[in-house]
Image (tube, rainbow, N blue to C red):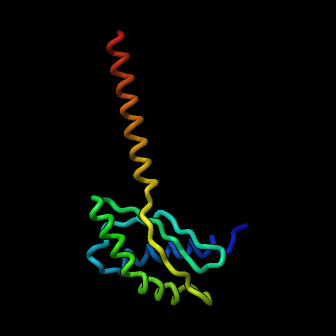
Amino acid sequence: MFKRSEKVAEAVHELISELLVKGLKDPRIGFVTITGVKVTDDMHLATVYFTVIGSDAEKKATEQGLNSARGFIRKEMGKSLRMRYVPDIVFKYDVSVDYGYRIESILKEISSSEQSDDKQDS
């Protein structure tokens, strides 16, 4: 059984993803992927997690672009989600993808050093 906030989070995720493809024309917004949405149980706040391919400056510019489009996104949410109250939106960069890349690179280093040690022992 799903909580209502989880269903709303899924609907918000789909809507924002669709808006990123179709509607937002801000040049600061780069190649964005919405990785998750969490809505509080009282449905007053939606935290939208995103990732961007690019440098740190591009990540910050994208976050600024998304935050400046919050009003437009809330208006579109109000049109499509039939709710008494449309949740406020907070955009946060999802650092879990960066952690995943870092862990993967460390594991590759360990693997390559073990292989070179095995070749030296032979």
Name the side, left or right, on which 116 lies relative to 91.
left
Residue, x 36% and y 80% (percent of image)?
A: 68
Name the side, left or right, on which 71 lies relative to 86.
left
Q: Quadrant of the N terminus?
A: bottom right
Residue, x 37% and y 16% (percent of image)?
A: 118
Name the side, left or right, on which 80 lies relative to 52.
right
33 or 21: which is nearer to us? 33
Locate residue 24, reporting x and y percent.
Answer: 35, 80
Q: Farthest residue toward the right?
A: 1
Q: Farthest residue toward the top?
A: 122
Among the 4 quarters of the image, the one containing residue 32: bottom left
51 or 20: which is nearer to us? 51
Q: Quadrant of the C terminus?
A: top left
Residue, x 51% and y 90% (percent of image)?
A: 79
Locate residue 25, reporting x and y percent.
Answer: 30, 80
Locate residue 120, reporting x and y percent.
Answer: 32, 13
**Count of all numbered marks drawn on residues in the image:** 0
120 is higher (above) or lower (below) than 8: above
Among the 4 quarters of the image, the one containing residue 61: bottom left
74 is higher (above) or lower (below) than 20: below
Locate residue 33, reporting x and y percent.
Answer: 40, 65
Among the 4 quarters of the image, the one containing residue 95: bottom left
Residue, x 27% and y 58% (percent of image)?
A: 55
84 is higher (above) or lower (below) than 42: below
